[in-house]
Image: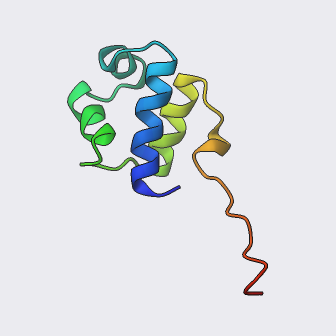
Amino acid sequence: MARGQTTTALRQWRIEAGWTLDELAGVTGYSTAMLSRVERGERTLSAQSKVLVARRLGVSVAELFPVAAPDLESA
């Protein structure tokens, strides 16, 4: 998943879960400011941090690391 997609998805998943940044910060241990920067695309999360946030939001970890379909036309 590209950087922009991850940040957009994180915000979308948080909103769909009905959580504020403060609530997500409380259950992940990350600051509200840091999570806000991630959502705006100003900072990235490590793979381990993405997994933690996804689990707290009830999102499948597989959604963070989608497998690209092979390009059969150029094969």
Taking depth in this image into account, of 5 and 65 the one nearest to the observer is 5
Residue sitting at 49 percent across and 50 percent down? 47
Q: Report the residue at 44% width, 35% height from top.
A: 10
Q: Seen in the image, is 44 located left or right of residue 15? A: left
Residue beneath the point at 50% across and 45% down: 48
Q: Is residue 30 above or below residue 17?
A: below
Specify whether 39 is left or right of 50. left
Q: Position of residue 49 (x, y in %)?
A: 45, 41
Q: Position of residue 13 (x, y in %)?
A: 50, 28
Q: Nearer the viewer, residue 51 or 67?
A: 67
Location of the C terminus (image quadrant): bottom right
Asked if 6 appears above or below 35 in the picture, the reply is: below
Which of the 4 image quarters holds residue 30? top left
Please tell me which residue lies in front, 67 or 56: 67
- Residue 65: where, in percent of width, then height? 61, 52
Q: Quadrant of residue 33?
A: top left
